[in-house]
Image (spheres, rainbow, N blue to C red):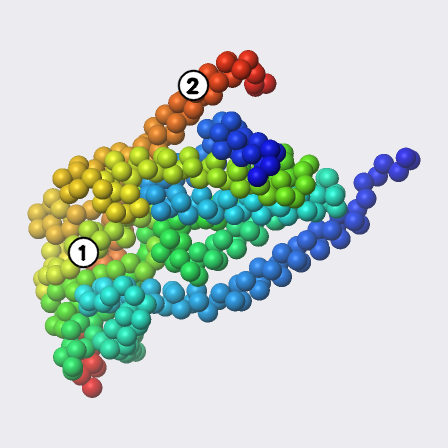
């Protein structure tokens, strides 16, 4: 054969066809599952909010949704969007979504206070991209649970959360994940500070 | 099951096991093996992706221009991995979250590309599909063996069910990355001894 030049048209056409076929398949699958995935992520966020507010729920989708609808109302003032947990008109607590920089990316979490903003009701992390197995362990219950009931009515030099074993320490950091632990602490400290300054406004607002 | 299929499975599961004979797919074998559930899902995901990628590559092998075959294979593999990812997100959100980025990284698992290139490219669809299952299963089994030891010693549990009782002191080392290295090395060591013995007996030396 005299023609040794590689054909150019056929490979391109072939690639275009293969790509189109697979793109079409993926698009269809994506379309079919889009609602389910959205729903799953909404339920997950709701369960985290309930957890932060220390409201008990069964770990089923129906229970999460019904408990959420029963207790929680979303409100917003000029500066804040927040969630109020109410049980028969009695306020159980307030939750705020807070965002800050972790080691690798943003850490989003819920931060919940009791009705008088004197202590933390709890926290839960919505999303983060910390190192799996190290900083990623902020998801683990032992870490999350230690924020429950922390007194925020007075601070030590503007810090509400202090790592043990420092004097007045109230939180254990994660071994091997110093940067992530520090990031979490400062995100929470900063946001607690900011929220507490606005607490009068929020308490007034929620009574209306 | 005919003779040829049996041969394929013997090679994939044992004599040419992708992990301990070909030392492929090591990264994920080290990363996800701290829990049985994660390893099982990862193994099933890989069986699915390898089998269907090989099937597809084999089906279109006569039409694929040789010099763009790698590009086509990568496209096919990615499409199947995305399907697995979407499926897990929609129906098993908690597992999807536990595996995190590793599902997407199935794309980079050398086993799939290796089998597509060395087997599916030259063999009919049925055997290519079988070869994918065999290689994927070979990988899955090694993962499960490693995870069995790591989860049992590291958490005292299997598939999250407590086996060794409350009094068990967890070997934290087993959950950490070094535990995976130790386990994998031990498995490669044992299997190498066993397989070398076999080949000495039969006199069939390997061309390696």
Residue depicted at x 22% and y 42%: B163
Q: Quadrant of residue B51?
A: top right
**Outermost residue, right direction?**
A2
Vertical position of residue A93 compared to residue B50: above or below: below
Measuring from the top left, give residue B5's x and y in whole percent. 58, 36
Letter of the chain that mark 2 sits on in the rendering: B
The chain that hosts pointer 1 is A
Q: Mark 1 points at which residue?
A: A145
> Percent x, y for residue A43?
34, 67
The kind of secondary structure element at disc 2 is: helix
Looking at the image, the residue that sits furthest to the bottom is: A208
Could you tell whether A10 is left or right of A80 in the image? right
- Residue drawn at (48%, 66%) of the image: A34
Q: Do the residues bearing badges 2 and 1 touch, measured as CB atoms within 8 Å?
A: no
Q: As displayed, is residue B144 above or below residue A148?
A: above
Numbered marks: total: 2
Q: Name the residue under label 2.
A: B193
Pointers 2 and 1 within a single chain: no
Horizontal relation, residue A139 to residue A120: left or right: right
Residue B52: percent from the left, percent from the top?
A: 58, 48
Camera-near label (2 vs 1) is 2
Who is closer to the viewer here, A11 or B203? B203
Q: Which of A90 and B135 is in front in this view?
A: B135
Q: What element carries label 1?
A: helix
Quadrant (top left, top right, bottom left, bottom right) of the N terminus of chain B: top right
Q: In which quarter of the image is the C terminus of chain B?
A: top right
Image quadrant of residue A186?
A: bottom left
């Amino acid at each position: 054969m005299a023609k040794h030049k590689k054909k150019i048209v056929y490979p391109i056409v072939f690639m275009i066809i293969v790509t189109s076929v697979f793109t079409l398949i993926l698009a269809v699958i994506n379309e079919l599952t889009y609602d389910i995935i959205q729903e799953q992520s909404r339920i997950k966020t709701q369960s985290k909010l309930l957890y932060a507010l220390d409201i008990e729920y069964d770990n089923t989708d129906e229970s999460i949704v019904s408990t959420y609808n029963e207790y929680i109302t979303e409100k917003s003032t000029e500066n804040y969007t927040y969630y109020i947990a109410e049980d028969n008109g009695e306020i159980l607590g307030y939750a705020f979504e807070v965002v800050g920089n972790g080691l690798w990316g943003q850490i989003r979490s819920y931060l919940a206070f009791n009705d008088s903003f004197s202590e933390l009701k709890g926290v839960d992390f919505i999303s983060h991209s910390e190192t799996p197995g190290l900083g990623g362990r902020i998801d683990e219950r032992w870490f999350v649970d230690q924020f429950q009931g922390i007194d925020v009515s007075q601070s030590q030099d503007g810090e509400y959360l202090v790592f043990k074993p420092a004097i007045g320490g109230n939180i254990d950091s994660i071994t091997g994940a110093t940067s992530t632990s520090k990031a979490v602490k400062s995100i929470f400290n900063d946001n607690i500070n900011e929220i507490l300054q606005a607490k009068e406004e929020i308490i007034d607002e929620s009574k209306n | 099951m005919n003779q040829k299929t049996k041969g394929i499975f013997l090679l994939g599961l044992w004599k040419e096991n992708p992990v301990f004979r070909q030392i492929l797919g090591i990264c994920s074998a080290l990363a996800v093996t701290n829990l049985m559930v994660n390893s099982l899902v990862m193994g099933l995901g890989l069986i699915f992706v390898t089998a269907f990628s090989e099937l597809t590559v084999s089906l279109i092998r006569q039409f694929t221009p040789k010099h763009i075959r790698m590009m086509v294979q990568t496209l096919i593999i990615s499409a199947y991995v995305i399907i697995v990812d979407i499926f897990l997100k929609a129906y098993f959100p908690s597992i999807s979250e536990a595996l995190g980025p590793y599902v997407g990284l199935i794309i980079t698992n050398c086993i799939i590309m290796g089998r597509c290139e060395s087997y599916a490219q030259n063999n009919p669809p049925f055997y290519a599909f079988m070869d994918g299952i065999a290689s994927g299963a070979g990988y899955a089994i090694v993962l499960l063996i490693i995870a069995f030891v790591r989860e049992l010693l590291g958490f005292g549990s299997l598939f999250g069910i407590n086996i060794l009782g409350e009094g068990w002191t967890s070997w934290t080392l087993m959950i950490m990355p070094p535990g995976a290295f130790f386990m994998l090395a031990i498995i490669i060591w044992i299997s190498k001894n066993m397989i070398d013995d076999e080949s000495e007996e039969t006199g069939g030396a390997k061309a390696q």
